[in-house]
Image: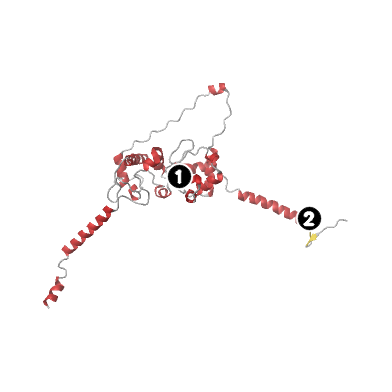
Amino acid sequence: MKREYFLRGVPLKKVAAVIVAAGFLSAMLLSVVGAGPPRDAGDGETIFQQKCASCHTIGGGTLVGPDLQGVTSLRDVDWLTRWLAAPDKMLADGDPIATALLQEFNNIPMPNLGLTDAEVADLIAYMQAQAPAEQAPEDAGSAAAQPEPQPEPVAAAPEGYVDFGSKLFVGELRLENGGPACISCHSIDTIRGMGGGTLGPNLTHVYNRYGEAGLTAALKSLPFPTMQGVFADRPLTEGEAADLKVFLAQTDLTTQQPVNATGFVALGVIGAIVFMGLSQLIWKKRLNGVRKPLVGR
């Protein structure tokens, strides 16, 4: 007779079977949880157009940043994931690839776009889907029979006007969709007086840093996190973007000295002197009613 062993009244065979089944189910659950959110190239395309297309293309050439055609083959997916999620942190940590890219592209850092893990995964899926596929060799006869694809016509960009661009920048002309004037956050060396705001960078040589294509794309979508919150529902029109671009292009060629704080301090001192002088003239007899009785005593 075969002996049957028990664990607290339960046959050991049944206990072992339960343990094996539990381990198998646990492994399945861990594989599902570890897989993360499903990647959706369609959602990734939407995110790319909204947050990336102003600085990058996929197969269209370099803008402010590099052309991303084939980037998923060039860079490791783990590196891309970390870069898309927190480029500022990678630059601060001295990542060698990130540092080299910063130097290559005019020291213009990629902003942290605040992407979620799912959005990062969708972006990578979209870029993987855009990777050039290997083409099978075609029969010479069939290739000759097919007409060459014709490029789609591109609408001509509106011509900008420097004077309008200058007035839009300083707020003499209001932006059509109600956005704030550029000078409220940015300064520029050719504008005297107060000089402009300091929330954003000085834009005197922004045309040289971005180039025509890059600046056109940046003005079109204003991809920077601070500006996205302000201009999300109040974008620039094509005409306003064209006017601002030619104004900034002209400004980039100037050699005028930047405005410093000396004029502002001098204005404050002069204003204080004038105020005290007027006060003395207006109230110079204010103490006579007190002084005369004292002198008489």
**Looking at the image, residue 217 lies above or below residue 36:** above
Mark 1 residue crowding within 10 angstroms, few (<14) / some (14–19) / many (20+): some
x, y percent for residue 153: 43, 30
Q: Amino acid at mark 1?
A: Leu
Q: Name the residue nearer the viewer: 177 or 23.
A: 23
* Residue 1 image point, x, y percent: 88, 56
For residue 263, side relative to residue 83 (left or right): left
| Pointer 1 residue | 102
The correct choice, above or below, for 106 with respect to 198 in the image is: above
Q: Is 203 left, or right, of 38 in this rendering?
A: left
Q: CB atoms at circles 2 and 1 under 8 Å apart?
A: no
**Circle 2 — which element?**
helix
Residue at screen point 54% across, 23% down:
143
| Rendered location of residue 201, percent (x, y) | 37, 48
- In the image, 278: left or right of 42? left
Using the numbered discs, state the Cα–Cα distance from disc 2 to disc 1 in whole angstroms.
63 Å
Residue 157: image tag: none
Q: Which quadrant is the C terminus positioned in?
A: bottom left
Q: Nearer the viewer, mark 2 or mark 1?
A: 1
What residue does disc 2 label?
A: 13
Residue at x-position 52% and y-position 48%: 82
| Sequence-first disc among 2 and 1 | 2
What's the residue type where badge 2 is placed? Lys
- At 12% across and 75% down in the image, what residue appears? 295
Q: Secondary structure at mark 1?
A: helix
Q: Horizontal and vertical percent for residue 97? A: 50, 44
196 left or right, relative to 284: right
Residue 181 in view of the camera: no
- Out of 202 and 16, give the one closest to the viewer: 202
Q: Is residue 45 visible?
A: yes
